[in-house]
Structures are given as C-alpha cells and as structure tokens.
Amino acid sequence: MLERLFALRSHATTPRTEILAGLTTFLTMAYIIFLNPSILGDAGMPKGAVFVATCLVACLGSTIMGLYANYPIALAPGMGLNAYFAYTVVLGMHYRWETALGAVFISGASFLAITLLGLRRLIVDGIPRSLRVALTVGIGLFLAVISLKSAGIVVADPATLVTLGDLRKPGPLMAVLGFVLIAAMSARKVGGALLVGILGITVLSFAVGTNHFAGIFALPPSLTPTLFKLDIRAALSGGILNVVLVFFLVELFDATGTLMGVAGRAGLLPAREPTRFNRALMADSSAIFAGALLGTSSTTAYLESAAGVEAGGRTGLTAITVAVLFLACLFIAPLAGSVPAYATAPALFYVACLMLREMTALDWDDITEIIPACVTALLTPLTFSIANGIGCGFIAFAAIKLLSGRAREVAAVTWLIAAVFAFKFAYANGAG
C-alpha cells in the first residue's frame, strides 16, 4: 500500500527513512503548537481553541500535501503571518480578530483562484534561474537566523541590532554541543543524525535540570470559541482591503519560495516533477481555508521541512508522519512541549549551512544575474521576510537588466512582479 501511494522505490527511500524524516521535521516545527496560541492570544483569541486549531490544520494541510502531492513538506500556521495578524492588524489597526480571520479567508480564496487558473505556476515559471537559486540560499540564511535566535546564540543589541549571546548559559551551550554532535555524526554517515541530535540534547536538558518533564497525556480544549467565527462581511470593508493584499502577497511569495527552496533540496523542482509541484501548490493554497474556518492565521509550507529532507525524506510519507504526530499532539501536548528550542535549533542551523552551497550554481561573471541573487539571499534574513527578499530581488533584477541594455532577457511576469512589489513598498512606506 505504501509503495502504491508514495512510490518509495522510485525515490530510493524506505518507510523507515521517511518516518524518521517526518519525525525530524515535526520536532523542528513543533514549537508552533505553543507559539501560535501565545501570539494569537495576545490578539484576544482563546488560547486553548487556537492550540486545537493549530494542531488540526497542521494535520489536515500536511495530509493533503502528502497524499495529493506526494511531497515531503509539512504545513502549519506561518510564524510571520501570525505576528502580522496579531500585532499589526488586531492590536495596531484595531480590527477584531474575527475580522482579521475573514481577511485571511479572502486572501486564501484569492490565493486558490490564481492557483486554479494556473497564474501561480506562471509566476513560478517567470522567476529567473538566478533568483530561484537565491531563494534556496535566502531560506537557508533565514533558517540560520531563526535557529540562532531561538537558541539564544544571537540576541538583540540596541547599538548593533544583533550580537553574540551569553554562551555560558545552559541553552546556548547545549545548542552548540548539539550542532557539533550533528555535524560529526553526519560526517561519519550516521543515519538519522539530525533526529539523534535533537533527542540527545532533549534528554540532556532533563539531566542538567534546565527542562521540566510536564507529563504525557492531556485532553484537548474545546475548539468552539474560534470555530467558524470569521467575519467575512467586515473583512470586505474598504479599510481592510490593504490587509487582505498584504496577506495575499506574503502567502504567495513566502509559500512559493519555501516550496521551491525545499523541493530543490529534495530534487523535486517543477522542471523534474511538474505535476507533483502543481499539486503541492494546490495543497498549500487549500490549507489557508481550513485554518481560517478553524480559527488560526494563514497556513503555509514550512521552512523546517528542509530538516526532514536532509534526513532523507523524499515522498509524501514524510508529510503524513508529520500529520499523525500533530494529531497526536492534541492528546500528548505536555510531552510534545518537552523538546526545548535549543534542541531543535542545532538541526535547523546545520541544514542552513548545507543550503548555502547552492550559490555555487550561479554565474558569478554575470553582474546582472549575481547582484539580484545576492540581494534576494541577503535581504531575506536581514528583513526577516522571504517576501521582502523576493520583492527586492525582482526589483533589482528588472532595474539592472533594463539599465544595462538587456531588458529583453526579462520575462513579462518578472516585470509585473517587480512593479507590484515596487508599488507595495512605496505604498507601505508612504502609509507609514
């Protein structure tokens, strides 16, 4: 049955490898189960219901991705999008969270429409090769920033923006130990090195007393306070249309960029697997609807899926494993919460290091290609946004090609995307 569903042999993988990869991916993204309710709770949403919605939509989205697209990519509510939802739309612009959920639903409908019409694939095909490579590198750098920040190795500084954290503290120290352990095991070709590293540091955290084992089983809270509570009518009012546009753009480019970056690492880019990639686009488009109906911010493909791909995941069985584990978290939330951030951070940072090697595929003698690629790769982590990195890269690509007399090398969709982002940046800046 597994062979019929996932074609394991043709992908040179086994059920054991896929399940271990799914467990690796899950452990690196399980933090969303606790962070999403915390962030959306700041916007006044019931945390218990958001916890259940987060687990259910991650299970549903990953299941669709696994069975329909046969991709080793997991879905869950996006971190950047939930922060925009809570702190900008609700707390900053003073919209009710029900209205914000309505905006998520409308943006999801628009997102699905351009996917069904083939426009999203047209956009993907219009991305220059150099920018596609830069997307993978930018995602790698973004993963590096996220992992170092969560481990406490990189911290905020008022004078220099960021600086080195206190490596004498248990968390950063164990994260460093975990990274060295993972790298050493990988060099020795030890199978499941990422998973062993994560679990090893988790066990160590109990031994040294920096982590508390909170138990295993707990009944899930009620979903009723957020189920079908979105207010679409209020979201259609003129004042929130800009919010819908931002949700749409971030969903479009964050999700597409993540899918392309992770699929590239797995050898499943559109040129090789066009049908499966189209289905992957449909899967992540559909998941946004479910999240809005259940009561959470936009659902998207997860960067942390790269950890599972690096652990050997190549088929949808990896995503199905993630889905089952998220469903189980409804009942074993205390156990899932026992894995600390400094245990998953080393795995993410190791994957980030490997993703940087993609830059060797660029033509470093062509300034019109390499500079936009570098802009994309660098601004993605520095602005903490895949969408911003993509937007700046497109604008730089179009402008440099135009001014260097090579405008004919720019596809029509590239001009359009560059213009849309230029307008968005100008409008956002003008609006303060």
Image (spheres, helix red, strand yellow):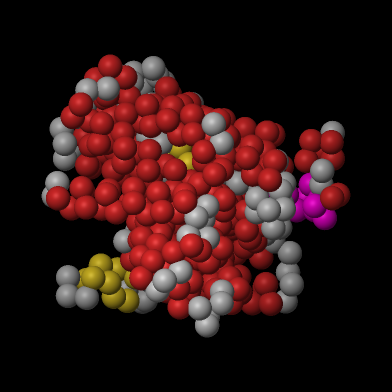
Front position in the image: 172 or 86: 86
Residue 355 image point, x, y percent = 56, 68
Look at the image and say whether residue 9 sits in the magenta stretch: no
Q: In which quarter of the image is residue 71?
A: top right
Look at the image and say whether residue 19 sits in the magenta stretch: yes
Q: Quadrant of residue 390?
A: bottom left
**Residue at 80% across / 52% down in the picture?**
11
**Residue at 73% across / 69% down in the picture?**
190
In the rendered structure, the answer to whether residue 190 lies left or right of residue 416 reads right
Front position in the image: 353 or 185: 353
Task: Tell me where the magenta segment starts and ends, as one range.
Answer: 11-21
The quarter of the picture where the N terminus appears is top right
Answer whether residue 53 is visible to the viewer in this image. Answer: no
Residue 116 image point, x, y percent = 55, 30
Residue 301 image point, x, y percent = 52, 45
In the rendered structure, the answer to whether residue 49 lies left or right of residue 280 reads left
In the rendered structure, the answer to whether residue 236 lies left or right of residue 15 reads left
Q: Quadrant of residue 403?
A: bottom left
Residue 268 image point, x, y percent = 68, 53
**Residue at 14% across / 46% down in the picture?**
431
Q: Is the magenta region chiefly helix, strand or loop? A: helix
Front position in the image: 352 or 202: 352
In the rendered structure, the answer to whether residue 238 lies left or right of residue 140 reads left
Answer whether residue 292 is visible to the viewer in this image. Answer: yes
